Each structure stands twice: as structure tokens, then as C-alpha cells.
Image (cartoon, rainbow, N blue to C red):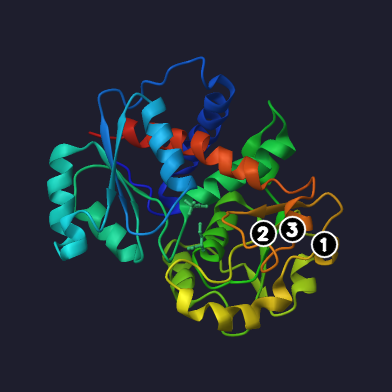
Amino acid sequence: MKHFLKETDLGPKELGEVFSLAREFKRTRGSVPGTALKGQTWAMIFAKSSTRTRVSFEVGINELGGHPLFLNTHDIQLGRGESVEDTARVLSRFVHGIVIRTFDQEQVERLAAAGSVPVINGLTDFLHPCQIYADAFTAAERWAGPKGDLLGALRGRKIAFLGDTGFNMANSWILGASLFGMRISLAGPAGYEPGTKIQALLKSEGRALDYSFTTDPSEAIQDADIVYTDVWASMGQEDEAKARVAKMRPYAVTAKLFAAAKPDALFMHCLPAHPGEEVEQAVLDNPRSIIFEEAENRLHVQKAILSVLAASRGK
Ligand code: CP
Ligand code: NVA
């Protein structure tokens, strides 16, 4: 049985399968009914707000013939102190899989370890692997076209990540770049550089620490094929918002800064965005901004991940 708690939980064969299935799901959506989750119920435990992740999973599970069961942590006993292990053991007797969005990556790992059904990480403070797969698929689709080699289209490309370089999206892109054979340069203020936890994960998987970090945004953006940013204050950091905005202001993706990347560079953002903070509205509106394709592809890519995980049950 497989879980998807981090980008590298799927091997090269499954990664290829996810990308080709996602392309097929996108092409045939509405004309071929899905069956991969027929008769299954998947729980969705959410401790944080969500538009894209929640809706794309609910719609995706439904389109695969399954039933999504949304569980806000405030409404279940987990929110009143029942252990994550007991929650996992109980839910495993009712449902066929679990999607979870929460704070600690460790909680997701404990849920997967104690339960007996596949678990998907729908975002933690540490990683957001569903987003990275959908993002990589979106860029690859642009570069490879409808029939080209999706994974091949990513190899050797450079992503510049600007702003909050010490949280989930930056961590996930560091791991994702290593997985997809991409180069990554991150630029953010001192004190917000990638932390020891992502370094320890790379090391434990025998991966090179081959990302570069600089406090100079114009250095990171040189030769970039993708310019990526995320909000400066993530969910759970609302109290730090003012201080973060003050420190991260030089890393805003302005039209001027975006113009310093490759002339055909793509702009990407996981959304939600704060126009006027981490990115200028003009960049969000640029024809090379593919933010809504990214959002849509969450559906197709997650349907593919769900299908691969469902097929791994009992193995
Ligand atoms: N990008 C993303 O995960 O969006 P939501 O928080 O709306 O799910
Ligand atoms: N870094 C953001 C990502 C939202 C999809 C957050 O954790 O709030």
C-alpha cells in the first residue's frame, strides 16, 4: 500500500503513470466516467481553510466513482484531543483512503503509520506535494504540448522561487526540483532561508543539496524558466503578517523583476494570491502567467494520484 505524504513517495514508474493518467483524465473529462474509486469512501480531514484542495479532491473522488467525506477537525474528536493514531485506526475501518490538511507533517506521518488505508498530504507547514505535482504537470504541458514527453520537458529547467523561502511551498519545490531534474534558486530575506528539516530530508533520501539561496532577487531570477512565489504569511502565521511583509517587500514579483527572467518564462503561484504584496496584478494578468491552469490541473493530477494509490491497496 502506498501513501503520498511527500513528493518522493512515488517512484519513477508511478510518477510517469500519474502524469500520463492526468493528461488522459484531462482530455476525456466529462466523456469517460471514472471507476478507480467505485464503491469507495475517502475521508478528507481539514484543520485549515481551503478552496482548491478541498474542491478538487471532492470533485475528483466523485468523478472516479467514489464518495468524499469532508471532516473539519473542529467537528471530529481529533479536534478535542483524540489521538491521531486512534483516529487513523477508527477511520481505517470505515473508509478506503484519507486526505489530510493540517499543521505538522509528523501528524500526517503518524496517521499513515497507524492506519491501514492510503493517506494523501493535502498540505502541511512542511510540504504541499499535490500542488507541486500539479504545478510541474502544468509547466510540462505548456512545454511538451499535447503529445510530447512531459517529464522530459522539465529536465534541466530552472525555477526561481521568491519571497518566503522557508515554508511549505519552498520546501516542496526544493524536493520537487530534485525529483524532476530541475534547477532551483531561491531568494528571500535572511532568517527565512530553507531550514534544516528540508536539508535533513534530502540527505536521508540520498539527494544532493543542490539548491541555491540568495538574498538578491535579481540574482535568483537570471535565466529562470519559471518564476514562482507564494503568500508571505501562510495559514497559521497571521500574527507575523506585518513583520513578514516589511521584510519580504524586496522580493515582490513586479513586472520589472519578471522581465529579468527568460523572455518566455512562466509565472506561477499556488494561490490564493495577495496582489500588491508578493506579486503585482500586472504579473498575475500577464499572458505567461499560468496560475489558473495550475489550479485546474489540481483536479486532473490528484485524480491520477488517487487512482495510483487505490490500485496499490492490498499490495
Ligand atoms: N493552492 C491551494 O492549496 O489552495 P487552497 O488553500 O485553496 O486549497
Ligand atoms: N504557503 C501557503 C500555501 C497555501 C496553498 C499556506 O500554507 O498558507
Residue 189 visible to the viewer: no
Q: CA distance from mark 2 to mark 1?
A: 13 Å
- The numbered mark, 3 or 2, whose residue comes first in the sequence reads 2
* Location of the C terminus (image quadrant): top left
Q: Residue 120: which numbered mark, if any?
A: none
Mark 2, residue position: 228
- The numbered mark, 3 or 1, whose residue comes first in the sequence reads 1
Q: In which quadrant of the rendered view does residue 313 lie?
A: top left
Q: Is residue 270 left or right of residue 310?
A: right
Q: CA distance from mark 3 to mark 1?
A: 9 Å
Q: In which quadrant of the rendered view does residue 95 lie?
A: top left
Q: Mark 1: which amino acid? A: Ala
Q: Residues within 10 Å of mark 3 (few under 14, many from 20)?
A: some
The residue mark sitting in front, 2 or 1, is 1
Residue at point 58%, 65% (across, down): 231
Q: Are marks 3 and 1 in contact (CB under 8 Å)?
A: no
Q: Where is residue 208 drawn, in percent x and y?
A: 55, 65
Q: Is residue 20 left or right of residue 41?
A: right
Q: Is residue 101 left or right of residue 157?
A: left
Q: Where is residue 234 drawn, in percent x and y?
A: 50, 68
Q: Residue 255: which numbered mark, if any?
A: 1
Mark 3, residue position: 281
Q: Where is residue 256 drawn, in percent x and y?
A: 85, 65
